Amino acid sequence: MNVTGSMGIAVTVRPCCRLLVAQLFSECPCHQRRAAAAFFFPRCPHDRRRASKCPRAPALSLAPQRRSAASWVRAALAPARDEAAVSDARRLSTAAGPVPGVDRAFERIFVQGLAAVEPLVIERVAEKERMLAVEETGKVEEVEEEQRAEVAKAREVSESEKEAWRLLKNAVVEYCGSPVGTVAATDPAAEALNYDQVFIRDFVPSALAFLLKGDTEVVRNFLLYTLQLQSWEKTVDCYSPGQGLMPASFKVRSVPLDVSKDEVEEMLDPDFGESAIGRVAPVDSGLWWIILLRAYGKITGDYTLQERVDVQTGIKLILNLCLSDGFDMFPTLLVTDGSCMIDRRMGIHGHPLEIQALFYSALRCSREMIVVNDGSKSLLRAINNRLSALSFHVREYYWVDMKKINEIYRYKTEEYSQDAINKFNIYPEQIPGWLVDWVPEKGGYFIGNLQPAHMDFRFFSLGNLWAIVSSLATPRQAEGILDLIEEKWDDLVGNMPLKICYPALEYDEWRIITGSDPKNTPWSYHNGGSWPTLLWQFTSACIKMGRPELARKAITIAENRLSNDKWPEYYDTPTGRFIGKQSRLYQTWTIAGFLASKLLLENPEMASILTFEEDLELLEGCACSLIKSPRTQCSRRAAKSHVLH
Ligand code: GLC
């Protein structure tokens, strides 16, 4: 067993964790293992009568009163922090000199990665210095004018925004006296179910709103506490999913202390999908966690957090899960249905776009954040290879526009050979009737899913928007997606931004694909409902592409309704006219998405904490052995010019 190599940790920790529990409880029944889990789980003693006695979670170490087995094992097995590598990385962020002992291709990629991570605080300091210089040269008026504009901006906070901030702050959850996240909804009229939990994906817009307001504590705590949950032993009927899995959500529970009935202690109780409806693993959680970690570093300039050994290990565990070999033929990530924002059966098993866009983004974030040392070199190489293959695959095979659909319409089928044009053996009869009239002359989009002999032509908003934000889309494709949204505004925005997917599944399709799900009836919820939380992703994409006016138009539509409608989770009908049938009110990510969008529009440069630019070197880097083979041509090489132009 390799306990020092970073990639070895995942392999090592898990059996130890099991061993530890197995030694304590020699038989397997799940409830006994759960009891073992509770024993080691982070808990915070809490005196019911004197709540103030509850100790504050230490800001840096976040050491729980009782350490979880995971962190206990992790601490014992984690490789010693490589200070030399860390300081080298820092040095390299400003210098481009060669790194001794690192191979050249890798070195180039790493330096390039770091160059992109310039902290915004540095930009702010530079801005202050500029202001001083302006004053010194007598341009005081200019400064005063800017200040007046700032004050005016501050005064412009609308009543909706004020209400939204109040609600967002009310949604904050504390653990041991420290803020650790926001609950999914605070609807007093609806049964809580699991909406009183902190969902990883739901917290991202909250985090963004807080970060943009300068409130970083809750985000830092969230990142560190969810990290502790990552490695906890989790089971569905005695089967455990992979160790790097991040929970879908967690709850802060108060449980009576064993010794005294009067005293309670707080504990974090994660749900990895074992309680969630449908029992699906939340694949997107770990990807969102990595994306948020980078955003936190970029906005605060506090890179010590991402350099911590436990945080580095956390990133590697997630990547271990995503990059492990399987039976798959594609570079896209293979997942079950409902493994992301759409967490119910909706025909998005296989290689759904949303997961691929988040995966690409998380890989690019990781490439920037992973500290270079001997243990991480091969991982970084694997990341680069995957990024390169993934972007090619999605750009080439998921993209449709008028021209491409016409090509598919004329596809030959049953082509055997490496030169096949119709690689996935798509039967043209699959082109749905609605698409023929719907696809505009200008613009295009990435289809929702691609499998052998199957293209899911539905338009999924999150995947398309995140493809823009992360630069998974080429600049031309990114433009094309926004063109299509503008062109199809009534269908995709209508009375409430933004349709989760278009169009809805109806009749037999609804019956077969959703399993007759009464929540996902046509034009409701995940099946063509409108989700205001998607506004912040739309805003980020518009800002990145220099089209903020589109986002402004969508925000105005939302602002006119959200507060009156009590901040619903989603809207129904083809144009989003009605509040969703079973929609929660006071849904936190609706509120936070609105606030984050407003703040991003006011400070468009801040969108860079989420975005990436096109990386031309990734297009060069083809690991394919066909390049050298005289027998066959590498199709990526042949198609590259097509992707670029
Ligand atoms: C619903 C959504 C999911 C969200 C959860 C909490 O299940 O589908 O994406 O995380 O509610 O808001």
Image (cartoon, rainbow, N blue to C red):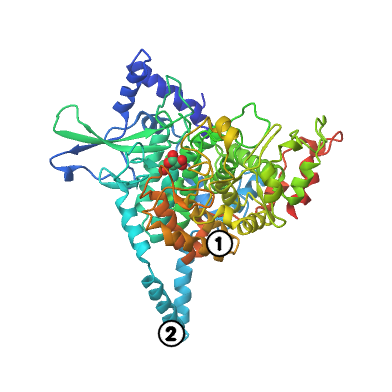
Image side of residue 134 versus residue 326, left or right: left
Relative to the observer, which residue lies in front, 204 or 336?
336
The image's mark for residue 140 is 2
Query: In the image, residue 432 lies at what x, y percent?
Result: 68, 41
The reply to whether residue 529 is in sight is: yes
x, y percent for residue 382: 62, 38
Query: Which image quadrant: the C terminus?
Result: bottom right
**Does residue 348 appear in this view?**
no
Q: Quadrant of residue 53?
A: top left
Q: Is residue 558 left or right of residue 115?
A: left
Residue 115 placement (x, y as % from top left):
57, 56
In the image, ligand 1 is in what quadrant? top left
Kind of residue at disc 1 = Ile
The residue positioned 43% from the left and 62% from the top of the image is: 560
Q: Are marks 2 and 1 in contact (CB under 8 Å)?
A: no
The residue wearing badge 1 is 543
Dot 2: what SS? helix
Q: Nearer the viewer, residue 460 or 472?
A: 460
